[in-house]
Image (tube, grey):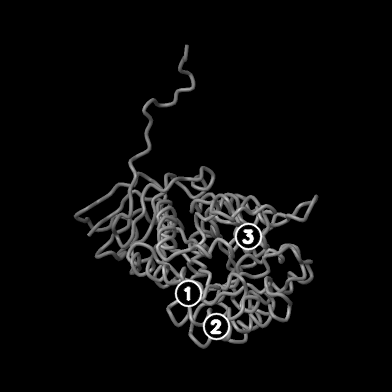
Amino acid sequence: MKKFVNANIYGNSNASEILIENGIIREIGTDLPSAEEETDLKGRLVVPPYVDAHLHLDYVYTGSSTGAKNNTGTLFEGIARWHDVKKHQTFADAKERALKGIREEVSRGVQFIRTHIDVCDPELTGLKAMLEVREQLQDNVTIQIVAFPQEGMYAYKGGDELVEEALKMGADCVGSIPHFEWAREFGEKSIRKTVELAVKYDKLIDVHCDETDDPMSRFVELLNALAMMEGIGSRTAASHTCSFGSADNAYAFRMMGLFRKSGLNFIALPTENAYLQGRQDTYPKRRGLTRVKEFWEQGINVCFGQDSINDPWYPAGNGNLMNVLDNGIHLAQTMSRPQLESCLDLITTNGAKTLNIEDRYGLDVAKPANFLVLDATSSFEAVRQRADVLASVRNGEYLFKKPEPSYDIELDIFRKTR
């Protein structure tokens, strides 16, 4: 057995010790039985692993590829650039870049990733590479794959058939992009097809939904209604929903009542959408974010994701969800003291709920011993300081562990320098 002591356990102020047996949390509390191996965490914060609920692993590190330059910085030009870039993608290239992106995320505390893989490719190259990677890395990182038609289920000829083939091959979720279809009717058709396929193959749903500044883009309304009718709202996620941030309040608050009723999940992408949206605005200029604050306050599940790492849509990104969180809570204006104490939920437990993995996620007895040790003594300080991850534990074993932070020459502001 192993025991971690002197821990500040996120969400459990009455406990300071974690006892692990055979990779499972046996007990959480104080004065627990002794163990063969004991680790003193010196008051540092222990949190569940980070969950990146939305990432495109087949796109990572293509931002510098020939033809990838996005001159307008818009979503739609990014899609056009990717159409050209992916023509040169090979299985080996897709796998190598995905592994590099996963390594970068895991090194920053991510243990659960939902990745959208473009299936608008008759060869399904990216999907095949990702299926192999998912299998190879399953002990150290949990990966969900979304069958995602980046160029549209219907705008791309046979896109709906490729999505279905991807599900048969083992993709976990059905994806679509209704606002990119060539007419509203086709966008609605793609939503109906998404729900139909999810029910047929018993899959989760994650739709790129209303990623536009147009307040009349309201595909989330149909997605929510169909999911509610099928009783699969909790298994359904709406990613982006940027237009909902521009919708009038009468519509928005009516819809939020329906979102609560269905149990629909929302994924916001703070860094990428702040960069992409509002490109046609002069001033006032929109932030590009959905109504994170209102969702949170009304008990509608919402989480954050990285989305992109150096691709035709977004030049930056490095899998550091603490940076994503920092941007998100600023943009959403969710920084009251109580919100700062609990906003780590946006990159941990809320993401786990979105991925439908709550049965095996969290700092609870009888669940896998998966957690992070942050270089902070409280959740408030972790967020304020953008705390580094000192250790990542998976099934009771270290994925990595860093040395104690130290100085070669310790700071002394009174030291004379001359």
Q: Position of residue 259 (x, y in %)?
A: 65, 74
Q: Position of residue 44 (x, y in %)?
A: 39, 47
Camera-nearest residue between 382 and 17:
382
Helix, strand or loop for disc 3 = helix
Q: Residue at the location (39% across, 70% down)?
A: 360
Helix, strand or loop for disc 1 = loop
Amino acid type at mark 2: Glu
Lower position in the chain sequence, tag 1 or tag 2 = 1
Q: Position of residue 293 (x, y in %)?
A: 65, 60
Lower position in the chain sequence, tag 3 or tag 2 = 3
In the rendered structure, find residue 123 and report the number of the disc placed on it. 1
Q: Is residue 225 left or right of residue 1?
A: right
Q: Position of residue 230 (x, y in %)?
A: 58, 86
Q: Is residue 391 left or right of residue 215?
A: left
Q: Residue at the location (19% across, 55% down)?
A: 36
What is the spatial separation of the Cα atoms under label 1 and label 2, in whole angstroms?
13 Å
Q: Is residue 227 above or below residue 82?
A: below
What is the spatial separation of the Cα atoms under label 3 and label 1, in whole angstroms?
22 Å
Helix, strand or loop for disc 2 = helix
Lower position in the chain sequence, tag 3 or tag 1 = 3
Amino acid type at mark 3: Gly
In the rendered structure, find residue 161 and report the number of the disc placed on it. 2
Dot 3 corresponds to which residue? 78
Amino acid type at mark 1: Glu
Q: Is residue 66 left or right of residue 244?
A: left
What is the spatial separation of the Cα atoms under label 3 and label 2, in whole angstroms?
24 Å
Neighbours of disc 2 within 10 Å: few (<14), some (14-19), many (20+)? some
Residue 229 visible? yes
